[in-house]
Amino acid sequence: MPLPKEILKQRLEHELAICRRKLRHEIICSDETFSNFPVQITVNMKGVPAPVMRNGILTHRYNHKFLIEITEDYPYQKPIIRWQTDIFHPNIMIPEDGGYVCTKLLDDWDFSSNLLSFFKGIESLLCNPNPSNPYGTDSCTRAAEYFYKHPEYKPPMIVEKKPTIGIVKPAGKDEGKEVKKEEKTPEETTEKKESNPSEN
């Protein structure tokens, strides 16, 4: 039996609020009032390295998009996921093959599961391909073969941007005032080199 509509609405509002507060990703809901189901959530995941294959060379992209469909039977029914961006991963289908995502979080989904733990699980899956449990599509089996042959694979390290303190000397009474500046990390520079601007 599904949750009463008002309780389901409150639960989803609460889960989305936590995700938006704790994650850097952009989360767009097709109906913030949760008046009509199914509801579609678009997630623009930012700053997470994931493998892509370009011209026979493994590289990485850092921004990803996937869709989540939430039915009125949530949370008894697990979310329906569709990947939308390029990927070279044994456990995530490319969009042309359906964009399905194979993760233990979905296999073990129950009433106590939530969107925040699911999003964090996707982040972990992107960085840690599991070649022993691939989908049967061509792209996924090729990815599984690649990661079997390269067990040393590790994704690039992501370092958060940190503010630095600098001294500026503008004319006037605020001379010598300390201000915070943001510096780009080496990983952000790498992202620009590896990512095609049209994809981000």
Image (cartoon, helix red, strand yellow):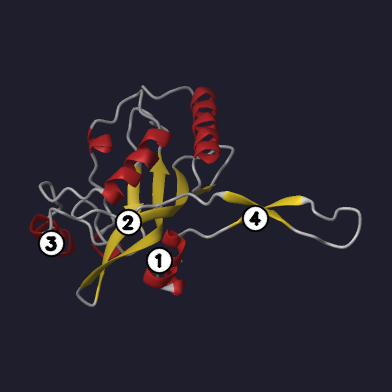
Q: Residues within 10 Å of mark 3 (few under 14, many from 20)?
A: some
Sooner in the amino-acid sequence: mark 3 or mark 4: 3
Task: Check whether the beta carbons of the residues at disc 2 and disc 4 lie within 8 A of each other.
Answer: no
Of tags 1 and 4, which is closer to the observer? 4
Badge 2 or badge 3: first in the primary sequence: 3
Q: Nearer the viewer, mark 3 or mark 1?
A: 1
The residue tagged 3 is 146
Mark 3 to mark 1 CA distance (whole Å): 22 Å
Q: What residue does disc 1 label?
A: 190
Residue type, numbered disc 1: Thr
Q: Which residue is mark 2?
A: 156
Q: Amino acid at mark 4?
A: Lys
Q: Label 2 crowding class (10 Å Cα cut-off): few <14, some 14-19, many 20+?
A: some
Q: Earlier in the sequence, mark 2 or mark 1?
A: 2
Marks 3, 4: nearer the viewer: 4
Q: Are marks 2 and 3 in contact (CB under 8 Å)?
A: no
Residue ID for mark 4: 181
Residue depicted at x 46% and y 47%? 40
Residue at position x 43%, y 51% in the image: 159
Instruction: Name the N-terminal-most of marks 3 and 1.
Output: 3
Point out residue 126 in the picture as x, y percentages from the top left corner: 30, 51
Q: x, y percentage for residue 35?
A: 55, 37
